[in-house]
Image (tube, grey):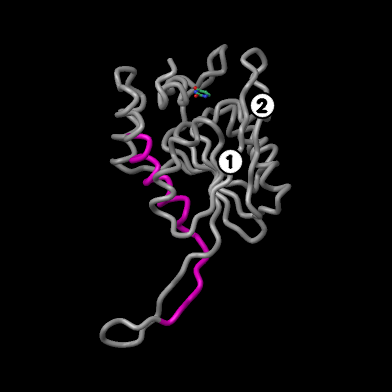
């Protein structure tokens, strides 16, 4: 299985804040940030390290440094996860992938892409809502075309349809999520879900 659903009390708390339709945008943004910290810790568990030698005030000892990590925020909802990534991962570089879904067909339409060189990098794709999987699959193809081979997607909520599609189209990509929900509705929203993540983050309801 390419999906890890984290089991952490803080993740459950923050996810409940996000799911609650009464949560206003400012509290929603804070909860998205808090939840992303927990996703980052899980997603970076196997991050490659370089061993170094460091001097403490007392003696020489072994130290470690993380290697090249690139976060790719899928616009616009992925921006709600970016601050937590910037605060936790040293030297992280950031790419952006702009895709919007056609509301009728739910197919991804690219409108912007700016990626750093990804060869040798650990890539974390920030795509909070894995619904049909169209946007994430498109973003993964994009980062693979720029040389990425070590790719993890950070999602707030996944749907069975999106996970299945990712497994079929990109079985090498690991997905870390806070919840795996029941299904998509006829408008391709995740149920029970949390509504439109971008609208709730930025108050454009
Ligand atoms: N995108 C969202 O923001 N919410 C969903 O439920 C599905 C896709």
- The disc, 2 or 1, on the residue closer to the chain's N-terminal end is 1
Q: Nearer the viewer, residue 38 or 56?
A: 56
The structure residue drawn at horizontal position 66% and vertical position 55%, both measured from the top left corner, is 117
Please, which residue is most extreme toward the left here? 58
Left or right: 68 in relation to 147: left
Residue highlighted by disc 1: 96
Q: Residue at x 60, y 58 (%)?
A: 121
How far from the left and from the top, in percent, is residue 185?
53, 14
| Residue position marked by numbered label 2 in the rendering | 108
Instruction: Classify residue 158 as left or right of residue 173.
Output: left
Mark 2 is surrounded, within 10 Å at the Cα level, by few (under 14), some (14 to 19) or many (20 or more) other residues, namely many
Does dot 2 land on a helix, a strand or a loop?
strand
Q: What element carries label 1?
A: strand
Q: How many marks?
A: 2
Q: Residue at x 65, y 34 (%)?
A: 112
Image quarter of residue 97: top right
């Amino acid at each position: 299985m390419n999906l890890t659903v984290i089991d952490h009390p803080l993740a459950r708390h923050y996810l409940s804040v996000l799911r609650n339709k009464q949560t206003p945008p400012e509290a929603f943004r804070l909860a998205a940030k808090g939840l992303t910290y927990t996703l980052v810790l899980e997603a970076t568990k196997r991050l490659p390290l370089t061993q170094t030698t460091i001097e403490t005030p007392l003696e020489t000892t072994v130290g470690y440094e993380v290697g090249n990590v690139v976060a790719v925020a899928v616009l616009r909802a992925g921006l709600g996860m970016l601050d937590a990534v910037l605060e936790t991962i040293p030297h992280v570089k950031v790419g952006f992938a702009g895709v919007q879904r056609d509301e009728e067909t739910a197919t991804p339409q690219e409108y912007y892409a700016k990626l750093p060189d990804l060869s040798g990098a650990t890539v974390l794709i920030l795509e909070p809502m894995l619904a049909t999987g169209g946007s994430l699959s498109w973003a993964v193809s994009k980062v693979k075309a720029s040389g990425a081979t070590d790719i993890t997607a950070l999602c707030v909520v996944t749907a069975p349809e999106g996970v299945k599609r990712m497994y079929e189209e990109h079985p090498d990509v690991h997905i870390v999520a806070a919840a795996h929900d029941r299904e998509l509705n006829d408008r391709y929203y995740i149920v029970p879900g949390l509504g439109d993540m971008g609208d709730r983050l930025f108050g454009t309801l």
